[in-house]
């Protein structure tokens, strides 16, 4: 007679894990803490592996440690953390005393009031007002600079040499009123770097469009030329940056340094 022994079937990994959990629950208490991927487990064993002996221990340890474990699962701190506590990076805050305002053109529609706010910014000048633009033909802006000059503000204007003599330019009117005006006719830079024969004899353009008030306390910069077309018909922008305490590293101070460099170079 041949006695047959039934084949031994090995459980799948999933069933094996389930079986281990079942045995753990039989010998003590397996307490899940947390949710999702951050779930932890607290296993409290009873005396001799019996359920009844671990009930008191479970009650005491659960109240003591569940809060700590739950805090770790949520990414919080605790004395039992295994690594450095995660702290949120502080949100960036604007520099103290700095504010910005964006102006868009054309006026009056759809950006009613932009030109008035631009004039109000220029009226804030108390010591100096330096303007560097390609073209200057707008009568109201010309009047704003002359008004600043009359109240004792030092006003300096840098324009492109071709545009200075163009029809409608306000450069001569400003100079007649006592405003200091210079152009880039003495620039040594050639158009196209002097590489093209048809333009090698021409100097490059003064194409900046910015104004600096009181050494950098207020800065106006953007695409805006100081022309009537820019106010009434062109799509333009001006960024107004106010800094109540400009430092040597501020944007306004950097623009002031650049204006001074150009002013001296083109004297």
Image (spheres, rainbow, N blue to C red):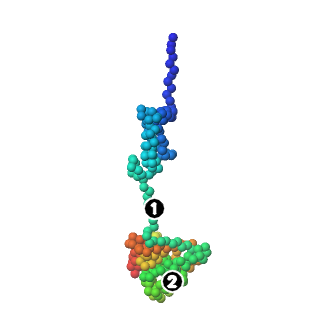
What is the residue that sits farthest to the top in this orientation? 1
Dot 1: what SS? loop
What is the residue that sits farthest to the right in this orientation? 109
Q: Residues within 10 Å of mark 2 (few under 14, many from 20)?
A: some
| Residue 92 % position (x, y) | 45, 63
At 48% from the left and 77% from the top, the residue drawn is 133
Q: Which mark sits nearer the N-terminus, 2 or 1?
A: 1
In the rendering, which numbered label is found on residue 144? 2
At 49% from the left and 71% from the top, the residue drawn is 100
Question: Real-space Cα distance between discs 2 and 1?
Answer: 40 Å
Residue 125 seen: yes
Nearer to the camera, 66 or 239: 66
Dot 2: what SS? helix
Numbered circles on residues, count: 2
At 54% from the left and 73% from the top, the residue drawn is 103
Residue where numbered disc 1 is placed: 91
Residue 258 seen: no
| Residue 146 % position (x, y) | 49, 86
| Residue 45 % position (x, y) | 43, 36
């Amino acid at each position: 007679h041949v006695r047959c022994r039934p084949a031994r079937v090995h459980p799948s990994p999933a069933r094996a894990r389930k079986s281990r959990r079942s045995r753990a629950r039989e010998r003590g208490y397996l307490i899940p803490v947390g949710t999702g991927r951050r779930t932890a487990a607290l296993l409290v064993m009873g005396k001799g592996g019996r359920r009844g002996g671990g009930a008191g221990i479970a009650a005491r340890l659960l109240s003591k440690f569940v809060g700590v474990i739950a805090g770790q699962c949520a990414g919080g701190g605790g004395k039992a953390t295994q690594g450095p506590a995660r702290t949120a990076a502080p949100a960036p805050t604007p520099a103290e005393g700095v504010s910005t305002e964006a102006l868009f053109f054309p006026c009056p529609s759809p950006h009613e009031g932009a030109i008035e706010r631009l004039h109000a910014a220029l009226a804030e000048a108390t010591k100096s007002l330096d303007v560097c633009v390609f073209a200057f033909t707008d009568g109201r802006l010309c009047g704003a600079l002359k008004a600043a000059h009359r109240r004792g503000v030092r006003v300096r204007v840098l324009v492109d040499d071709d545009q200075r003599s163009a029809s409608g330019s306000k450069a001569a009117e400003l100079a007649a009123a006592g405003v200091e005006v210079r152009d880039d006719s003495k620039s040594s830079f050639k158009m196209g770097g002097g590489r093209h024969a048809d333009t090698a004899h021409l100097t490059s353009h003064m194409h900046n469009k910015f104004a600096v008030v009181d050494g950098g306390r207020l800065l106006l910069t953007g695409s805006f030329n100081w022309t009537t077309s820019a106010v009434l018909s062109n799509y333009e922008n001006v960024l107004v940056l106010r800094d109540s305490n400009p430092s040597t590293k501020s944007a306004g101070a950097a623009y002031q340094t650049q204006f001074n460099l150009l002013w001296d170079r083109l004297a």
